[in-house]
Amino acid sequence: MEQIVHFFETIPFWYWWILTLGLLALEVMTGTTYLLWPAAAAVITGFSALFPFSNSWQLQILLFTITTGILMMIAAPRLKPWLASARHDHELLNERGTRKIGRKVSVNSDFSNGNGHVRLDDTLWLAESETGEDYPAETKLEITRVEGAKLYVKAIDQNQSE
């Protein structure tokens, strides 16, 4: 027990910064933001340990505990919505196929049995009619869904403008 007390009595400020690096490494691995607040508290405690009034290890532990609690109560609820909105802005980032939904395409060659090829930009895509209809070449269609490399299409409503 005396060794533990001696360790805490002689703890230098940079131990807090090593604790910060360890907590941040764990935070990067988990991505939960739960370890972000103790890491920030460890930085603050490390800086406060540089000043002579906070040489007491009990005061450092108390500062670390209180700062962690305050950050978790105040900063965490504000960070979660911000992170959620940032994810919402990029929810289709790695789903390139879903970005095609709603785009207009033209039939390259006549559909047969509800299947054919459509031109999207400069690429020919395998397409299937949602309703099983056969479309003649040059018909304008709209992409309704994507499964792998196959586009599912439907006729554009006459009331819609291009």
Image (spheres, rainbow, N blue to C red):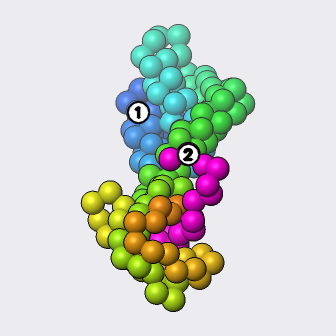
Residue type marked 2: Ser
Q: Nearer the viewer, residue 122 or 85?
A: 122
State the SS at label 2.
Answer: loop
Residue at disc 1, secondary structure? helix
Residue at 35 percent across and 65 percent down: it is 119
> Taking the image as drawn, is residue 45 in sight?
yes
Place of residue 6 in the rendered image (x, y in percent of width and height, measured from the top left): 49, 37
Visible residue check, residue 35 = no
Determine which residue is flagged by label 2. 161
Give the residue at x 41% y 33%.
Answer: 17
- Magenta-drawn stretch contains 3: no
Mark 1 or 2, closer to the camera? 2
Q: Callout 1, which amino acid?
A: Trp
Rendering quarter of residue 24:
top left
Asked if residue 137 lies left or right of residue 64, the reply is: left
Image coordinates for residue 157, horizontal then vertical, percent: 62, 57
Which quadrant holds residue 33?
A: top right
Label ID, residue 17: 1
CA distance for labels 1 and 2: 61 Å
As rendered, which of 146 and 58 lies closer to the eye? Answer: 146
> Looking at the image, is 64 positioned above or below residue 141?
above
Q: Which residues are magenta?
A: 143-162
Mark earlier in primary sequence (1, 2): 1
